[in-house]
Image (cartoon, rainbow, N blue to C red):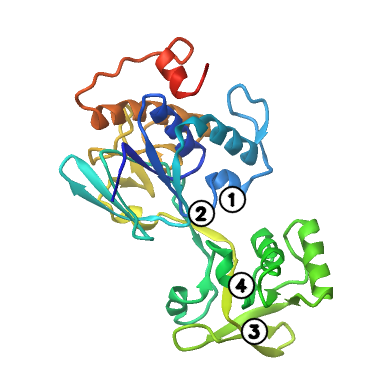
Amino acid sequence: MKKTDAVIIGAGPVGLFAVFELGIMGLNAHVIDNLDKVGGQCIELYPDKPIYDIPALPECTGESLTKNLLKQIKPFNTEFHLNQRVESLEKKDHNWIVTTSDQEKFETPNVIIAAGVGSFEPRKPPIKNIEKFEKTNLYYAVKDKNKFKDQIVCIFGGGDSALDWTVELSKIAKKVILIHRRDDFRAAQHTVGLARDLEKEGKVEILTCYQPLDFKGDESIKTVEVKHDDGQQKNIEVDSVLAFFGLKMELGPIANWGLDLEAKSLKVNTENFETNEKGIFAIGDICTYPGKLKLILSGFHEGALCAQECFKRAKPDEKYVFRFTTSSSDIQKRLGVK
């Protein structure tokens, strides 16, 4: 069980800025996200798309904004827990016990939900009883690439994740079989070219215009059955399967935490962005209140006010004196400013 001043659910821009606001007050935080990387919607949905409404930045991208926020919070040595989601919240006196899908546990007085429009859930192939394979050799993300060493790996998908891992795993796998339902790929052309070169070298097999029909096996997948657009079927023996069919956004377990909901958003007050449960806050696109604007800059404001209340709960015996970063030597020390 890890004890911390705050647990932040969501590693998007608003969650990252909440880390900063907590950090300059001397509070530590752990950040949990369902994705395999930091950045939330900005990274997953529009990493290269220009953003024009961030103050003092006439133009930036989701990727550059994320990098700058990570640079801003670097002095706080924040721990990130990726590829997992919060499954449960339990009350314990003044604190909350937070449990993730990987069974990591945290005890904290403050839970900040900065989950955007909810968690990103993988789109699953339309295979009957597919859940049983998720415990063995069916994956929707790669946590440890070394587990695929010397394996026959079947990868479904035509986007960047599918092509990137086709190229990367070809270095350690016995064989990589890439299967896509179309002739054309949506990934970066350079990566597609690398995969095609690997196909010529015999390290990768690429099957296009095929879709999954069935996964055969008792506890783990032994054979993948696929069907071509012309009706031809193939049975492919595999050791592991990676499915990259994209992501869908779901509220997920948040809906079961007893928080006040309004149209899949969490109702908060505008004094400190606390929900109907003491110590549970919601900021960014996940929260709603009269006059709410779903803008990143609004989320930054919400995170700043939320952090003030978090300090009161984390350090009830201390009085926080608000100071500007330009004039506070304590804040500058925490930021590593000399």
Q: CA distance from mark 3 to mark 2?
A: 28 Å
On the image, the x and y values in percent for residue 172 come to 66, 70
Q: Amino acid at mark 4?
A: Lys
Which numbered marker is on residue 149? 4
Residue extending farthest to the left is 93
Crowding at dot 4, Cα within 10 Å, few <14 / some 14-19 / many 20+, comes out as: some
Q: CA distance from mark 1 to mark 4?
A: 27 Å
Q: Are marks 2 and 1 in contact (CB under 8 Å)?
A: yes
Q: Can you identify the residue that label 3 sits on?
A: 226
Ranked by sequence position, the earlier of labels 3 and 2 is 2
Taking the image as shown, residue 297 lies to the left or right of residue 208, namely left
Q: For marks 3 and 2, give the one nearer the viewer.
A: 2
Which residue shows up at 64% across the image and 36% down it? 64
Q: Can you identify the residue that label 1 sits on?
A: 44
Q: CA distance from mark 2 to mark 1?
A: 8 Å
Q: CA distance from mark 1 to mark 3?
A: 28 Å
Q: CA distance from mark 2 to mark 4?
A: 23 Å
Ranked by sequence position, the earlier of labels 1 and 3 is 1
On the image, the x and y values in percent for residue 70 come to 54, 36
- Residue 73 vertical position relative to residue 43 in the rendered view, above or below: above
Which residue shows up at 47% across the image and 78% down it? 133
Q: Can you identify the residue that label 2 sits on?
A: 35
Taking the image as shown, residue 261 lies to the left or right of residue 82, namely left
